[in-house]
Image: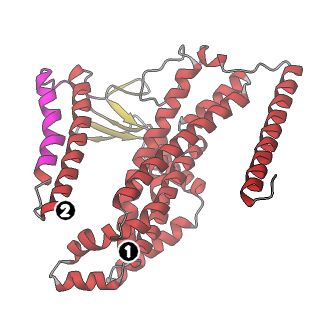
Amino acid sequence: MFGSERQRGILYQVLLLAIVVGVGWYLVSNTLHNLSSRQIQVGFGFLGKEAGFEIAEKHIAYEASDSYGRAFLVGMVNTLLVAALGIVVATVLGTLLGVARLSSNWLIARLASAYVEVMRNVPLLLQLFVWYGLFTELLPGVREAIDVGGWLFVSQRGFRFAWPAPHAAWAACGWALLAGVALAAAWARLASRHQAATGVRRPTGLPTLALVVGLPVLAWAAYGAPTAVEVPVLEGFDFQGGRVVSPEFMALLIGLSTYTAAFIAEVVRAGILAVPRGQGEAAMALGLTPGQRLRLITLPQALRVIIPPMTSQYLNLTKNSSLAVAIGYPDLVAVANTTMNQTGQAIEAIAILMAVYLTISLLISLLMNAYNNRVRLVER
C-alpha cells in the first residue's frame, strides 16, 4: 500500500505531526495540572483588573487606575516607537558608513572601518550603560538645567521643550500628513511606471513636497490655525508643561541605532561590492557624477543583495530593544516584569511578550519581503 515514495512521504509527515501534537498536548496538560495542584491561577482575566502602578514614560493616555491590558498597550507603543525610530536612524547611518568604507579617501575609509569594528565588538548592553551614564552624569541637575532660548531645557531628567497646546487641529494635521505620504508614494509609483513605459521622467520632488507639507498646512488652517504653545516652567523638583524626551529613551535609541548601524554598514558594503565593476565604468562613460552613479546605478542594483540581510538587522534591533529594562525605559518587557511581580501570572505575561514580538517580527519580514519582490531584478 505504501510502496511509492510519495505515499511513504505522506505517512511520515502524518506520523511526525501526530508526535508533535501529542508532545504539545502532554506538556500543556501537565503544566495546567501542576499549576492547578499548586492553586496557581491561570488565564488572562487579570488583563481587565486595575494595574495600580505608574509608567514614567507614555505616549498614550494611562493612569495607575487603568487595567493591566492598558499598561501592556503603553509598553507596546513605547517599544514600537523606539524600534521604528531606531530602524530609520540605523539605516541612514549604516548606509553612510557602508559607502564611506569604500571611499577613495584614506582617512574617511579608515575612520568608518574603525567605527564598524569597535561598535560590532562591544556588547550592546554595555553600550547602553555607557550612553545612559553620559546622559545622567554629564548633564546638570534640574535646577541648573541648560536653557536654550527659553524653549528647551537640558538636564539629567532629559530634554524638556516647548510643544503646541492640545487642539483638534494637530490631530487633523497628523492624519493629513499620513494621507500626504500615501499620495506621494502613489504618485512616485505612477511616475516610475510612466518612465518605464515612455522614457519620460515626471517630476516627483515638488509634488511630494506639496502633498507632504501642503495637506497638513491646509488641515491646520481649516481648524483655526492654532498657535498656542506650552512652554516648560520649573515647578518644584521638575519642569512642567511642554514635552520631554527622557535620558532612558535617548540612551536606548542611540545605543540601538549606533550598534545596528555597524552591521548595516557591512551589509551595504557587501551589496555595493556585488555590483559588477563594469556598471560603474559604463556610468562614468556616460558622464555621470560619483553621486549619480551611486544613487542611480549602484544602489538600485545592490538592493537585491542588501535587503535580505538588512531585514535580519531590523529584526535584531526590534528584539534588542528588550534590553531597555536594564536602563529603566518602560518598554513592553518592563511592563510585563511589573505585571508578573504583582499578579504572579508569569506564563501569561511571557506568552503576551512572545506573541507581540512574534507579530512585530512577522510584520517587518512581510513588509521587507514585499519591498524585496518589488525591487528585485527580473530576468527577461
Q: Residue furthest front?
A: 1
**Label 1 residue SS:** helix
Q: Is residue 291 above or below residue 234?
A: below
Which disc number belongs to residue 153? Answer: none
Residue at image mark 1 = 272
Residue at image mark 2 = 196
Image location (x, y in percent) of residue 186: 22, 45
Picture residue at 74% right of the left edge, 24% below the top: 344
Q: From this viewpoint, is residue 156 visible?
A: no
Q: Is residue 153 above or below residue 116?
A: above
The quarter of the picture where residue 342 lies is top right
**Label 2 residue SS:** helix
The quarter of the picture where residue 169 lies is top left
Q: Is residue 146 magenta?
A: no
Q: Nearer the viewer, residue 132 or 213?
A: 213
- Disc 2 marks a residue whose amino acid type is Ala
Picture residue at 33% right of the left edge, 70% below the top: 380
Q: CA distance from mark 1 to mark 2?
A: 24 Å
Q: Which portion, as a residue range, is magenta?
A: 207-231
Q: Nearer the viewer, residue 337 or 185?
A: 185
10 Å crowding of disc 2: few (<14), some (14-19), many (20+): few
Q: Earlier in the sequence, mark 1 or mark 2?
A: 2
Image location (x, y in percent) of residue 328: 56, 38
* Mark 1 in CB contact with mark 2 (< 8 angstroms): no
Look at discs 1 and 2 and give the one toward the viewer.
2
Image location (x, y in percent) of residue 40: 81, 20
